[in-house]
Image: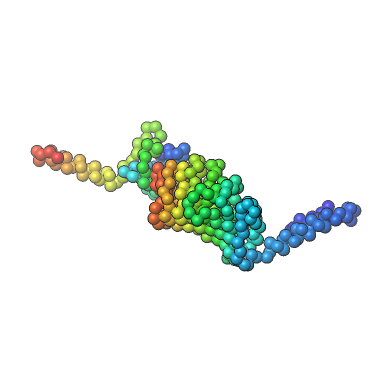
Amino acid sequence: MNYTNNLNLKKPGYSDPADIQDINDNMDIIDQQINNLDAEKIARTITVGVGKDFTTIQAAIDSIKKHIKGAITIQVDEGTYNENLYITDFYGDGNIIIKGATSLTDTHRISQMFISNCGNVSISGFKMTSSGYHDVEARVVGNLYMQDIKTDVVSSFNGFQILNSLATIVNCQISNKYSALYAAQLSIVVSRDWVAGAGNAVGITSNYGSTVAKVGIQPQGTAAEAVFNGGVIR
Amino acid sequence: MKTLNFNGEKLQAENIIKTDTDIIGYDENNKEIFAFRGISDFTLFTLEEGQVFDISDEDKKNHRLTDLEVAMAAMLGGGM
């Protein structure tokens, strides 16, 4: 059996038996690739919860095409979702909006979020429950908006870990972490109107040339702020 | 070179200055390489054994002024 270079399609040799499954597998791969080329052009809402479009948030995220030109909203019902969310590789001038509660509450619970290589992402209204890693990590995100995110689970990691990204963080409450907000690798973060939190080693950390702009109440720590390697907090 | 311990981290700097609210590390060119600001509990920040925090230039000036004032008062026969 040989395979094509790009899509890894099966190419039976002249002496191989003809297997209809090989043909079907090839067609599925081609069909998926064509689907990926198409963009989400029309704004729509996907619901998550018991009896809704999906029962897990990740399944809702995975149902979205990678090329987005409209606003895709994922509306999440109350509940505990033991999920590590991966929001990765969405591009285009549309945006992904994931909505839980409309204020800082414990009603919508997820483990952690990892957002990378995305254009516009907005997430609001979740309590994070993981202690094994940063609650929210963003890498190379063009425009990240986080609101009403909270956690009080004790860990040595950060609440928000923002790397190579532009982000706005509003009305969040992070407690018992190393740093409530950690910005690094030339990130620019607007940090607005927090509920102060407690038990963090550092409130805000800016490292490797990042800039954090403060507006209103900021997260608290044993040290309110820490800067390293050209980081700026102002 | 001095070493600052905080929360399991070790941070090295040529000079580590402590003020009323901050701890700042400088390299040999007097360039700031780290800073902790708005500290509420200094007991969590320690230097390696035998090392002491440095004093800022402003604090050094203030100490000199205080010493001068004490000396002048003594010379004039008064007290502070």
Q: Nearer the viewer, residue A182 or A228?
A: A182
Q: Which of A134 and B56 is in front in this view?
A: A134
The image quarter containing residue A44 is bottom right
Q: Looking at the image, how many numbered discs can be counted on the residues?
A: 0
Is residue B26 in view from this perspective? Answer: no
Whole-percent x, y for residue A35 in the image: 70, 62
Whole-percent x, y for residue A169 in the image: 47, 55
Question: Residue at the spot x=81%, y=57% of the render?
Answer: A24
- Which residue is most to the front? A51
Q: In which quarter of the image is the C terminus of chain B?
A: top left
Whole-percent x, y for residue B33 in the image: 42, 47
**A222 is higher (above) or lower (below) than A217:** above
Question: Residue at the spot x=41%, y=47% of the render?
Answer: A220
**A97 is higher (above) or lower (below) than B80:** below
Q: Nearer the viewer, residue B15 or A119?
A: A119
Q: What's the coloring here?
A: rainbow
- Which residue is most to the left? B77
Is residue A195 in view from this perspective? Answer: yes
Question: Residue at the spot x=29%, y=46% of the render?
Answer: B57
Whole-percent x, y for residue B46 in the image: 39, 36
> On the rendered structure, is B36 left or right of B62?
right
The image quarter containing residue B27 is top left
> On the rendered structure, is B27 left or right of A112?
left
> On the rendered structure, is A61 left or right of A150?
right
Question: Residue at the spot x=28%, y=47% of the render?
Answer: B58
Q: In which quarter of the image is the N terminus of chain B?
A: top left
